[in-house]
Image (tube, rainbow, N blue to C red):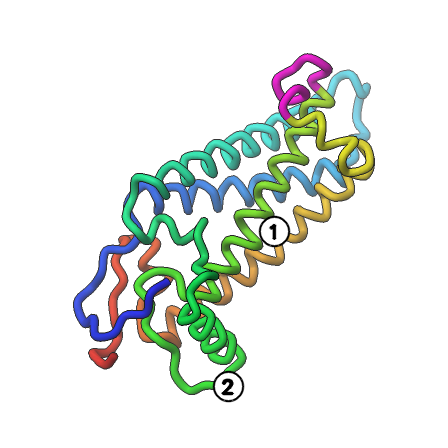
Amino acid sequence: MASIDSFSEPVYVYEKPVRLWHWVNALAIVVLVVTGFLIAWPPVVTSGEASDHYLMGYIRFVHFSAGYVLAVGLIGRAYWALVGNRYARELFTPRVHDSAWWEGLVHEVRWYLFLVGEPRKHAGHNPLAGLAMFLFYVLGSLFMIATGFALYGEGLGAGSWAASAFGWVLPALGGSQQVHSLHHLGMWYLVIFTLIHVYVAVREQHLSRQSVTTTMVDGWRVWKDDRP
């Protein structure tokens, strides 16, 4: 989260495993949203006998597979936060204990609201982006993984690994139907967050004092001026 005081040379921020996770994770979310929508509103097949079709079976299989990718990817990303560079840890460790971080957070809120004329330089996530990624993406993904595997375990049956690991989620949240509804609402929650995330990233690429979207392609943060 640290601001950069006088950097003019590019800084290597996102290592290859982080960039690979980002794009694979983005694809998994798209697949989960599309298949989740189709599970909630199944397509109507009118030709032939119902037993001749396995459309929903294929849709559910793709949904479950993407769910595994999301979960395993988050575990891998947490591991890389431990062994990667300092920027790899920012996703999981917003610096709420740092008074300068809070001052930077307020400045970023004012910048996004067009109340200040110029943003600050940040090699990694700025304070607001880091906090948003933790609160909305990390915690939101954990909720979707827990509720998703709880419903998956219900289908697999008692004794399955998913039922054993996540079966407690169903009674804790009010039962199967309630978890279905919460999981579906969580899908829209992640859709809205993703749209805001893309908008902000593109906006910052053009209006901030450093590269943003291109940094997740090549890993390098490039500065647009030499000033502090």
* Kind of residue sitting beneath label 1: Leu
Whether residue 55 appears in this view of the structure is no
Apparent side of residue 160 relative to residue 82 in the rendered image (left or right): right
Spot occupied by residue 30 in the image (x, y as percentages of width and height) = 55, 45
133 up-or-down from 180: above or below: below
Spot occupied by residue 116 in the image (x, y as percentages of width and height) = 45, 86
Closest to the observer: 92 or 215?
Answer: 92
Spot occupied by residue 78 in the image (x, y as percentages of width and height) = 42, 39
**Could you tell me which residue is drawn at 42 percent across and 45 percent down?**
23
186 up-or-down from 66: above or below: below
Q: Which residues are magenta?
A: 156-165
Q: Nearer the viewer, mark 2 or mark 1?
A: 2
Apparent side of residue 152 relative to residue 109 in the rendered image (left or right): right
The outermost residue toward the top is: 159
**Could you tell me which residue is drawn at 47 percent across and 38 percent down?**
74
Whether residue 105 appears in this view of the structure is yes
